[in-house]
């Protein structure tokens, strides 16, 4: 069985660009801490938006979708799910809420991961929820001509329980002994988790939930305000490319996790930059028109009302619509499309 010993990773020499990524994340995390002390109440709406986006995006990556209205109802109002997709979405919502509220009371162990997986399926009948896989699974790609190719074969079912337990033990050891920077250890843990692929279903969603949990436990709270899942969904190809590049040679311990580490750290840093941008908009109380004007100036190319809503969480939909209408009338913005496909772009680049 594959060994989970991070000593080789600890001794590895990392490139200056990757070390710069780590340094930049620590710098942004420090700035975020100052922002939170200044205006904690102004950020509550960012939390709600991030929950909705994370729940929607992480499920959408797996083809589990519903309407925008139902996503908001399921996450914000905790309404009863109507079908299988909504049952899975509601389960993700519940696990994410538990992580948000109790991350410091959730140890990284096999049994806790199994409990979280069981909650992921708590709104539907799934006899293997909370249990490791019972059949061999494969990571495959389907090509335009219809043929399917196996890209990676995870561990066999009989190897999985012990492997998951040892992975958690090794992670806790290096984190507890300060042997490895958490910004290296976390991507390596997630990479190894995905290579084990411990469940018959839900591995991708569990990996993203665990990413948030591990980051929170190490003091990196950006995912509470900016959806990491939405960033991953927007760059799915880069995510899968990085994972594939890192999986080669994994079974024999000859893999190189650096592509996946680099990808995940880049995503985290990008989320911190987004947080800073959004905080600047809510830091000073401004009229709705001025807020939407500034938000539109942050956008390059076409953008939607939803894009502005994310940047202006304190404004109601009607305030945003009214401000956009005035900016179109004044000639600052151009409106295109109709209905759900309406978009805007700036006419004055000053």
Image (cartoon, helix red, strand yellow):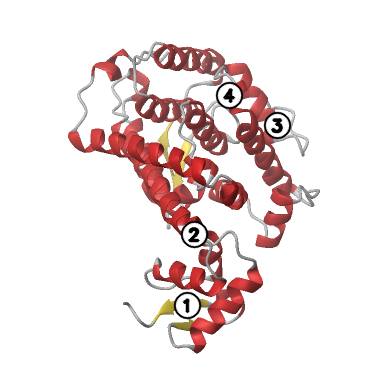
Of residues 52 and 161, the one nearer the viewer is 52
* 284 vs 311, nearest the viewer: 284
Say whether residue 83 is left or right of residue 217.
right
Q: Secondary structure at mark 2?
A: loop
Using the numbered discs, state the Cα–Cα distance from disc 1 to disc 3 in whole angstroms: 40 Å
Which residue is the site of mark 2? Answer: 284
On residue 119, the disc is 3
Does residue 50 appear in the picture of this structure?
no
> Of circles 1 and 2, which is in front?
2
Q: Which residue is mark 4?
A: 104
Labels 1, 3: front one:
1
Identify which residue, 6 or 180, lies in the foreground: 180
Q: Mark 3 or mark 4, which has the lower sequence index?
A: 4
Q: Are marks 1 and 2 in contact (CB under 8 Å)?
A: no
Residue 106: give x, y in percent of width and height. 60, 22
Q: Residue at x 72, y 57 (%)?
A: 70
In this view, 262 is above or below 1: below
In x, y percent, where is residue 313?
A: 58, 59
* Tag shown at residue 344: 1
For the residues labelled 1 and 2, the Cα–Cα distance comes to 25 Å
């Amino acid at each position: 069985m594959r060994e989970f010993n991070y000593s080789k990773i600890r001794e590895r020499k990392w490139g200056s660009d990757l070390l710069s990524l780590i340094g930049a994340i620590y710098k942004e995390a420090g700035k975020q801490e100052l922002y939170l002390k200044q205006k904690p109440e102004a950020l509550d709406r960012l939390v709600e938006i991030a929950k909705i986006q994370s729940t929607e995006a992480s499920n959408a990556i797996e083809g589990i979708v519903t309407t925008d209205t139902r996503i908001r109802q399921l996450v914000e109002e905790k309404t009863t799910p109507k079908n299988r997709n909504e049952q899975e979405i509601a389960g993700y919502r519940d696990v994410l809420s538990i992580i948000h509220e109790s991350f410091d009371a959730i140890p990284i162990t096999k049994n806790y991961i199994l409990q979280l997986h069981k909650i992921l399926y708590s709104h539907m009948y799934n006899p293997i929820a909370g249990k490791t896989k019972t059949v061999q699974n494969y990571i495959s790609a389907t090509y335009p001509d219809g043929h399917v190719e196996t890209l990676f074969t995870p561990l066999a079912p009989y190897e999985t329980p012990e492997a998951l337990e040892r992975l958690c033990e090794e992670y806790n050891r290096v984190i507890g002994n300060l042997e490895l920077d958490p910004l290296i250890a976390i991507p390596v843990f997630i990479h190894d988790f995905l290579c084990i692929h411990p469940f018959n279903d839900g591995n991708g969603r569990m990996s993203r939930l665990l990413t948030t949990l591990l980051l929170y436990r190490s003091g990196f709270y950006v995912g509470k305000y900016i959806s990491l899942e939405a960033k991953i969904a927007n760059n799915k190809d880069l995510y899968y490319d990085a994972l594939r590049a890192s999986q080669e040679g994994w079974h024999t311990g000859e893999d190189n996790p650096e592509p996946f580490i680099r990808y995940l750290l880049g995503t985290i840093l990008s989320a911190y930059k987004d947080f800073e941008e959004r905080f600047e908009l809510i830091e000073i109380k401004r009229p709705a028109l001025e807020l939407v004007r500034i938000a539109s100036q942050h956008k390059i190319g076409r953008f939607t009302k939803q894009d502005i809503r994310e940047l202006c969480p304190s404004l109601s939909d009607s305030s945003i619509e009214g401000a956009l209408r005035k900016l179109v009338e004044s000639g600052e913005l151009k409106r295109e499309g109709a209905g759900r496909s309406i978009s805007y772009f700036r006419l004055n680049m000053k």
